[in-house]
Amino acid sequence: MSDAPHILTLKIDDQDVSAVEGQTILAVARENGIAVPTLCFLKGLSPVGACRLCLVEIKGVPKLLPACVTRAAEGMEVTTDSPRLREYRRTILELLFAERNHVCSICVSNNNCELQSLARAQGLTHVRVPYRHPRLGVDATHSRFSADHNRCILCARCVRVCDEIEGAHTWDIMGRGIDCRVITDMNQPWGQSDTCTSCGKCVHVCPTGTLTEKGVAAAEMKKRQQFLPYLTAMREERE
Amino acid sequence: MTPEELRELAARRREELQEFKYRLNVCLAAGCQSCHGDSVYKALKAEVESRKLEGVQVRGVGCLSLCAEGPLVQVEPDNLLYQRVRAEDAPELIESMYGKPLKRLACPTDAPFFAAQKQIVLENSGRIDPESLEDYLAADGYEGLMRALTEMTPAEVIAEMTTSGLRGRGGGGFPTGLKWSTVAKSKGAKKFVICNGDEGDPGAFMDRSVLESDPHRVIEGMIIAGYAVGASHGYAYIRAEYPLAVKRIQNAIKQATKVGLLGEGICGTGFGFTIEVRLGAGAFVCGEETALIASIEGKRGQPRPRPPFPAESGLWGYPTLINNVETFANVPPILRNGGAWFAGMGTEKSKGTKVFALAGRVKNTGLIEVPMGITLRKIIFDIGGGIPDGKKFKAVQTGGPSGGCIPEEHLDMPVDYDSLAKVGSIMGSGGMIVMDETSCMVDVAKYFMEFCKSESCGKCVPCRAGTDQMHGLLSKICAGEATMDDLALLEHLCEVVKNTSLCGLGQTAPNPVLSTLRYFRHEYLAHIQEKRCPAGVCKIKAAAEVHA
Amino acid sequence: MSAKIRLATVWLDGCSGCHMSLLDIDERLLDIADRIELVSSPIMDVKGFPENIDLTIVEGAITNEEDLHKVLAFRKNTKLLMALGDCAITGNVPAMRNTFAIDDLYNRAYVENADAEKQVPGAVVPRLLDRTRPIHEVVPVDVYVPGCPPHADVIFYAIAELLEGRMPDPMKMGKFG
Ligand SMILES: Cc1cc2nc3c(=O)[nH]c(=O)nc-3n(C[C@H](O)[C@H](O)[C@H](O)COP(=O)(O)O)c2cc1C
Ligand code: SF4
Ligand code: SF4
Ligand code: FES
């Protein structure tokens, strides 16, 4: 009896929805076919609330809260789309495009990139902040994969999948602020990593053309992320 | 030790102190140390020894407040204060004790700098030897703890804190009693108490001074908190750049443990509490509570979204109380004198006192403690002695990189949490920088943005990339190369970064820009439209050069 | 039907792929031909800058002094300006040079990699600007048509909508970047 999940009712975009206690606003929204843009979130990995694209308005709460980590609560009134939210989301995407060198036309992930799709969905026409054009490198030392830092948005999906799913913790983030960079091991070339198992999970969870398989041409890289919910579901069952 | 034994210890020390007819208190806190206070201390000690004087004690003490005039020496029993003392002055100073006060070095203690202050947090600062437990005990130290443990239930302690109206001194101003009761109510197999001594605001040294001048006070506050919320272990997180503070707090922990004020069965009661010191590696963001907790856990010091708040799920997932150094330092006197006593000071919603590090373009810079509700004018012109060199006051900055600049028209406003917020600044942790007409407000905003940009942890997009872009735009304005479109973009980014960043660093990073835009927009416009820096700070190339 | 609209197309720092795509509109060009008067284009030989232009379509990023001069002149003489393709909108491939110092670029192109006449050219070649910029960083842009190159259908849609006096939303047919 006491194990029965507690059911909550709330409103998302004026729609009455129900949730199981503990569910995030994002999970409830998606169950009900309400689209909320996300970038750092990936089902199966621990949520970090870093990209800020999934911010929603909650009645009575002065701050915007990330749907991917905020739990649904009884009587909550959530707004996932408003002119203000759209404007903020667009600006965040612009900041990402300007931060590094996303030259989409020559990217192996062109047309199969989550950043691009979000830009389209949010109606981005141009980037209003100046492009920074930092000088960043490509690490092609791994026999099967390569890492193009020009296209990294620091979502830390690679770090999380490698640590939480593969258990190798090859990836991490180094530096502060605008100088942050993903690194393998203690900032050694990927090809020389002692911990990398070459499983390729990071490549497939990477939302952009940063981590890719070698030997694909522009616009040819398609990521396959289906393994992740499958793996996590299997693990949960075993536990 | 039992309370009786501790009180005996205190009584004995009081007697010992009485044995000295004269006492020379030499400030050995960071400010005076940096201008050779230690050599003054050694010279005075040597002088007393070589003259074989009886009844004269030379003591190293904590901050004596007027850092700008250091090294400072205070002479008891007459409470004369001497400034800018050098080692060579030792013989003359010693002789003056028996004769006339030494006019040449005298520091007028009846001046408003001292008279307008009200000391609670700093009551022992400069009056006790920070390395002596007995000194602290003799000044009623640990009386608050003993009262809490022997006469009160945890709920009563929390009620006392609530009555006091104390609000967090770490910047946010969250009601301390409410925080304590939330942690007390949270369920967890274990609970923790953390003292936030990361103090990363540029130019701030309030917490450092408390830790260096009166470390037992902070420990006492933490133990009382542990008792109130049901925690048996605490962490004192102190930035590694404060070696003296670290040394003194470690020393104090050792002393307190020795007499049973820390450990099992404190003061013969059933309550046990231990404290460990953790060092911060100098990242501003590690002062943010969730980043600080990550850092103690051995992870990268990055904030995580709240809720859940540490009070529900903090260190290793357990309910955790985290308070600032100055907040803890207020706890012992509240328990000693009662919450109502504390609530009798200050304004309706801001009780007690606040310690500020007064700096910038004022005559008297230093560490001051003032009652809440005092006006900014009084702080700057009475305590601070006004602006030097006949210059005109322009603005006062409170709250460091998260705060704002307040202009002349608001100087008669009372200093409390709500009034400061109303004019676009914040109380912050206690940085207070005075600026005169030689400061360019765009340049000031740029300085703080540069700070936020380099201290951003990089986790969330708006802060990581937004502070960099805002800094770029401010630099462009300062260089006289910006357009009105750039200004509009800057204002837009301020709004986005403020409302979408993950933690307080990003959420408040636009504040210095917003407040200078609010009061000094004309200075921005002068740079943009007239290619001119009114204060003459920014180097703007002549129009011809720009296009060349 | 009112008078013909005066159209100009401009080729700045781009590969001319956008102009190729424009021509790929093929026979549909004929549908709109009688409603357009082409006043300036790289496929024509026009000296100077025409005035009273209704729509200027710009391909390419702004890289050198000549690009800057052109874009300012056309903006002054046109009612609407369309940024056509990724180079015009984001800087794209031409802007990749922004991670290098200008002197290094000149040196690489004209000295290190030159077979003969190892020398940085003088006034005959327009000087590079400090960095390559997308159009909207320099002059206001009214319509953005993304793609590298944009598909002929998207270009046709955008022009056709403008001819009907409506603001097109090409983003819903293309993609950003
Ligand atoms: C970027 C940032 C830096 C902070 N730095 C400090 C600090 O150095 N010391 C501090 O006590 N609180 C700091 N805080 C506030 C803490 O997160 C927390 O609110 C405080 O320690 C709570 O204590 P209090 O309630 O006693 O004020 C900081 C917050 C942010 C967002
Ligand atoms: S490499 Fe890819 S997955 Fe990793 S942080 Fe960068 S964008 Fe995200
Ligand atoms: S606001 Fe800044 S400091 Fe805070 S999490 Fe985001 S990047 Fe890190
Ligand atoms: S998806 Fe929620 S913050 Fe990134």
Image (cartoon, coloured by chain):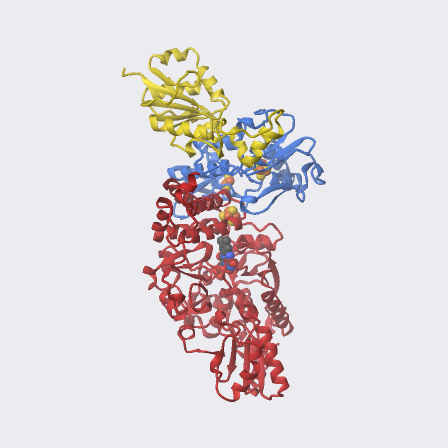
Chain colours: A blue, B red, C yellow
Q: Is residue A154 left or right of residue A146?
A: left
Q: Nearer the viewer, residue C112 or B513?
A: C112
Q: Nearer the viewer, residue B137 or A182?
A: A182
Residue B405 visible to an observer of this rendering: yes
* Residue at the image position 43 percent from the left and 55 percent from the top: B403
Q: Is residue C102 left or right of residue A214?
A: left
Residue B116 location, quadrant: bottom left
Residue B280 location, quadrant: bottom right
Percent x, y of residue C143: 39, 27
Q: Is residue B248 left or right of residue B333?
A: right
Percent x, y of residue C48: 38, 22
* Outermost residue toward the left in this view: C2
Q: Nearer the viewer, residue B59 or B250?
A: B59
Residue B379 location, quadrant: bottom left
Residue B301 versus residue A41 in the image, above or below: below
Residue A76 visible to an observer of this rendering: no
Q: Nearer the viewer, residue B45 or A16?
A: B45
Percent x, y of residue A120: 46, 30
Which quadrant holds the C terminus of chain B? top left
Picture mark count: 0
Percent x, y of residue B442: 41, 51
Which quadrant holds the N terminus of chain B? bottom right
Residue A68 versus residue A121 in the image, above or below: below
